[in-house]
Amino acid sequence: MSAHHCGMVAVIGRPNVGKSTLINAVMGRKVSIVTAKPQTTRHRILAVHTTADAQIIFVDTPGLHRNAGKAMNRLMNRTAASALADADLVLFVSDATRWTTEDDDVLKRMETCRAPIVALLNKVDKVHPKEKLFDALRVMSERYNFAEVVPISAQKHDNLDQLMAMIPRYLPESPPLFPEDMHTDRSADFHAAEIVREKLTLLLHQELPYGLTVQVERYLTEKSGVTIHAVIWVERDSQKGIVVGKNGGVLKKVGRAARLELKEQLHCPVHLELWVKVKSNWADNETDLLSLGYDAP
């Protein structure tokens, strides 16, 4: 009988490089919200993938930020750094189509990491002509002494089966740390808040999503379905008007999109009520961040 392997796999990279998309793809379910905007992932989220001979505990982390001006950005950087320190294996995700100074910054932070690091060159489906991919793989392997360099497309699911077969080789022999039916360490109300924030981020213009957060105040499961009351916190009165929209139009759109997705995921009717409130400068106040459920590694 082969040994059972189990361990923590930190998924690290600059913002908006496809870390959450990768985790959702290998899990076959939505564990982390995804948008095209940076800073979508703000929390450390565990995604637990269990098979007969391995349990892979992916740690989805916020993107490492070069300019950590606000308390929230500093907290997110600390969260990502603590995931690195605890990892048995690190997956360093970068974009096959472009390398940036932020990628350099992340790579520098990993130089003190004791765990093996596998470089994942993501979005290879966007590399044309395909000969360019061989150059990209060669350049990546010269950047650092990676354990392996693996080309993938998280969105198209290219090469993910090979990646999942490879990971257990780097994990210690250990019994499972979590029950086999557990998929994430995050609660249902946390996930509901994240779905609402995802819909807000998708609908609102460029800057505003960084100035808002969502907190579920009530999550009630009954025979008739699930009732959720959530507060959307913004930093200024002017932002409140934008989130509510003319005649409440924006809030209604967000509420409907979130409710439909939650209904599909939970397989039951969902009653969702949203309020918008102002908490001045919450994103630069560590006490406010902790009260709103942000991690403090």
Image (cartoon, helix red, strand yellow):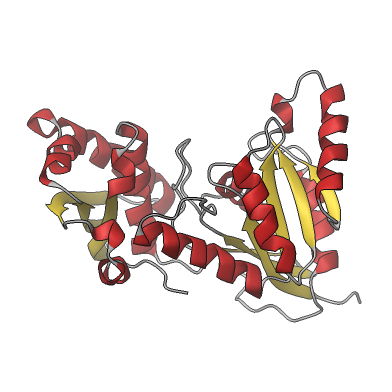
Q: Where residue 130 appears, x then y in whole percent?
A: 83, 23
Q: State whether residue 6 is above or below residue 212.
A: below
| Number of numbered discs visible in the structure rendering | 0
Q: Where residue 279 appears, x then y in whole percent?
A: 16, 58
Left or right, 69 with reference to 26:
left
Residue at image coords 15%, 32%: 245
Q: State whether residue 121 is above or below residue 218.
A: above
Left or right, 24 with reference to 130:
left
Res 184 seen here: no
Q: Residue furthest right?
A: 1
Q: State whether residue 60 is above or below residue 99.
A: below
Judge by depth and name the residue closer to the eye, 48 or 145: 145
Q: Where residue 236 appears, x then y in whole percent?
A: 15, 47
Q: Quadrant of the N terminus?
A: bottom right
Res 36 seen here: yes
Q: On the image, which quarter does residue 145 sit in?
A: bottom right
Residue at image coords 51%, 49%: 30
Q: Where residue 128 appears, x then y in whole percent?
A: 76, 19
Q: Residue furthest left?
A: 247
Judge by depth and name the residue closer to the eye, 102 or 165: 102
Left or right, 191 with reference to 285:
right
Residue at image coords 82%, 67%: 170
